[in-house]
Amino acid sequence: MFSELDLRNAANIRIPHEVNDVESDFLRKYSNEQDFNQKVKAKMVLDNRQILPIFGDKISSALIMSNFVPEEFLPVRPIILNSAAELRIANLPSEFVLKVNHASGGIILVTKRAHDALHLPKLPEGQDSIGWNRYVIHPDNFDIESAIRILEGWLKSSFNQVPNSIREWCYSQITPRSFVEEFAQDSAPTPRQLEFYCFHGKAKAAFFSDRSGTLKHSIYKACFRTEEMDFARIHSRLSLDQWGQILTASEAISSYTDMVRVDWLLTDNGPVFSELTNYPGGGAANYGDSGVLSNAQTLELFSDYWGEIGPYW
């Protein structure tokens, strides 16, 4: 559990970080007048506060959120794995999600709604890692040995830490772990998603998306601005009380930093906390035509909401 004092301290402690040549070149060209994606990249380079790995860790972020919402709004995670091999002896639910805590991606969703022709890939001999993919598998096709090999590859990998690039720094500071999460039921093939874009402790926009049944892409997107939050609540099909609780919680947890996206799943039983995202889109977000705004207009709006980034020192 993290107390308010723990989080305040973490928001003021910097972890030494060496900037590579690509990041140095970016900083020479960067100005605070850039759009949202450019500001995210600047945050990736400049913001080395201890709070970011705590937020970026899917396990610790849920513990933090337990300070702000009732238990029914938290993900049910009956099994935390110390190693991928422990999956062999785990008492798995009939439907569940396998995740790693240190990456955006790395998900195996096991549900009866999956197409019965889908299977987990088998890694060729000599290959011990696989990309940060999302897999949706029917329980009848779930192969534990294939899942273990995939998990082992993910646990050995650091998310998006390509040496000669602008790196998503916080993930390199998280000790890799994996866990089992109960599948959140929704009338859609996979749960709808609600993301609050929070700037300086205020939720300034709500972004909705429905993913395809394979989790490969979004089939619907809508962005609601500050003045449209009433429409966002109606669109979410949440009660006034549910909406108020998760909005308040999102703003409370975001008050420890200048910008963070607070992600929720919308299920048949109400909202469920998903994760905190320090770097939306890895600095390459594309919002398409979501609602009345184009992608460029959304990036400009989010940049305006953010204003001056930091300070981080």
Image: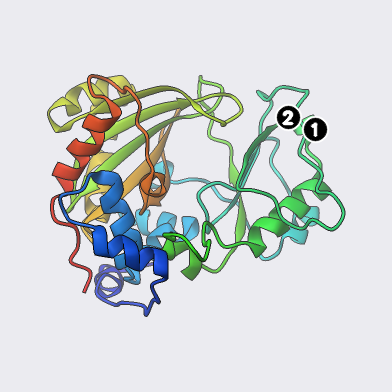
Q: How many marks?
A: 2
Tell me the quadrant of the picture where the C terminus can be found: bottom left
In this rendering, is residue 55 above or below 208? below
Q: Which residue is mark 2?
A: 138
Element assignment for label 2: loop
Q: Position of residue 229 (x, y in %)?
A: 19, 28
Where residue 166 appears, as percent x and y from the top left, is 41, 59
Report the front residue among 22 and 291: 22
Q: Nearer the viewer, residue 210 or 122?
A: 122
Q: Is residue 262 above or below residue 29?
A: above
Does any portion of residue 26 appear in the rendered image? yes
Task: Please name the residue shown 30% across and 73% down the image.
Answer: 10
Categorize mark 2 by other alpha carbons within 10 Å: few (<14), some (14-19), many (20+): many
Q: Secondary structure at mark 1?
A: helix
Mark 2 and mark 1 residues within 8 Å of each other at the beta carbon: yes
Q: Residue flagged by tag 2: what amino acid is it? A: His
Q: Position of residue 117 (x, y in %)?
A: 78, 23
Left or right of 270, for residue 80: right
For disc 1, the marked residue is 141
User: The N terminus appears in which quarter of the rendering?
Assistant: bottom left
